[in-house]
Amino acid sequence: MSTSTTTPPASGLDGWFSITQRGSSLAREVRGGLVTFFTMAYIIALNPLIIGTAPDVNGNLITGQPMLDASGATIGANVGASIAAVAAATALVAGVMTILMGVVGRFPLGLATGLGLNAMLAYVVAPHVTWSQAMGLIVWEGLIITALVLTGFREAVFRAVPRALRTGISVGIGLFITLVGLADARVVTNLGGTPVQLGATGSLMGWPVAVFVTGLLLLIVLYINRVRGAMLIAIVAMTVVAVVVETVLALGSAAVEGNTFGWALNVPAMPAEGLFRLPDLSLLGRVDLFGAFAGGPTVFLTMLLTVFALLLADFFDTMGTIVAVGAEGDLNDEDGNPPRTREILLVDSLAAVAGGLGSVSSNTSYIESAAGVGEGARTGFASVVTGVAFLVALFLSPLVNMVPSEAAAPVLVFVGFLMMSQVVHVDWDDPEDGIPAFLTMVLMPFTYSITVGIGAGFIVYVLIKLARGKAAQVHPLLYVVALAFVVYFAQGLITALIA
């Protein structure tokens, strides 16, 4: 039952956001909006380390500059510029879309680049296309979801995918993110004779690894003690430690040959140009909507499946998030639906489009919004406050360059834990649910491909149902999707036969 009161609104602002009606006040909304920002703000530091440091098919960063020089060494200036540009665009898109959620959706929900989706884009999609083409795929994904919202079809597709597979996708992405975090901190490497190993030499050595381990332990302690903004605090604290360590010891970059125990990505140091500067918004609009689909039928089909994989990964988190945030604030109706569901889903879908146009990956609703609701936020005015805070952060992008991957990677690992908690929703005693979910979960990190995990889960789910004579229990849409993934996995054979 939703929280409300019959007290008349004190002003037009109060009436539009239903502040009094939902039993709140401007002070509570401001406080809740700021708490949501501080629990989400880590994405300004984290997204650049994912999107801004990964090369595309041509070896270029998202800015179009090469990542490596002729000798194969990382060009630090180019990586730094890429990180700063992604940080500024991340804050801008998050700010605008969160304000839009507040004004249109009128719901206390923050939006920003989705973790998992950005990792998929950086480590799965970008190696096969240019960055502008990858962002074009994000725009198509957002447009399709927007169309599904406007036609009312989104809920139908949501119901078509069984809960076990939805859970498997979420947990699998969590495991994938964990592996990315461990690899970014060089806690897990493949430098030895085994597929993966502990550290760069088979053990944990070096100051950068110590920064990661300390950051992870700090984050755990803060989280179990319910400290607001635990992720942001951990990133900031370990960045300060990293800057001090680098200032004293001058470890340098691990990209330099022979410097095994240097920093994995960017070297933490005080920015020479100062802490404040005008944001670099050069990434806005760098989108190629059709380039990724060129190259023949196989490439076209692969890109269609990639858009579907992006869509599927983005598709189910939002509905769970808005219901969970609404429940936290006692805003949902007796059927468990939040107010203005259509408007909320519409803004969330447009956020995916905006993320592609802004070159920061799909933006989506953040479950961290529940922290702001816990602080008293009940209306969209809190989202406006959160969005304004993101816009202020636009001018602090030089600070982001100080954050080494070892300081941010603990958050990736911890997000994996948060997503892993959903594993209890799978009935492991029922092989019809357990086997597809298991394959979805494990194949994502073990093949380093979110798409592979999703595809395997769909195919095996349909196959098991057919083998047990339960074909009628499978939604027709799942047959189409499973068949598409069969073609996806057989594309190598198909290409060879054509050749």
Image: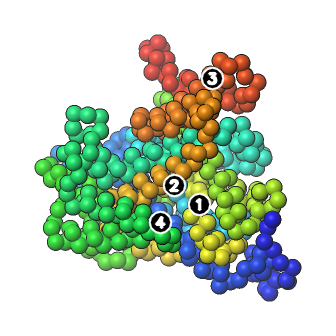
Mark-to-mark CA distance, 2 and 1: 11 Å
Give SS at disc 4: helix
Query: x and y percent of residue 131 in the render?
Result: 43, 47
Mark-to-mark CA distance, 2 and 4: 11 Å
Left or right position of 66 against 493: left
State the mark number for residue 418.
2
Q: Which residue is mark 4?
A: 223
Mark-to-mark CA distance, 1 and 4: 15 Å
Is the residue 161 above or below the residue 288 in the image? Answer: above
Mark-to-mark CA distance, 2 and 3: 29 Å
Q: Which residue is mark 3?
A: 464
Name the mark nearer the viewer: 2 or 1: 2
The quarter of the picture where the N terminus appears is: bottom right
Is disc 1 in contact with disc 3, using a CB cutoff of under 8 Å?
Answer: no
Which kind of residue does numbered mark 1 sit on?
Answer: Ile
Which kind of residue does numbered mark 2 sit on?
Answer: Leu
Task: Pick out the residue farthest to the left.
Answer: 258
What residue is at 87 percent from the left and 79 percent from the top? 6
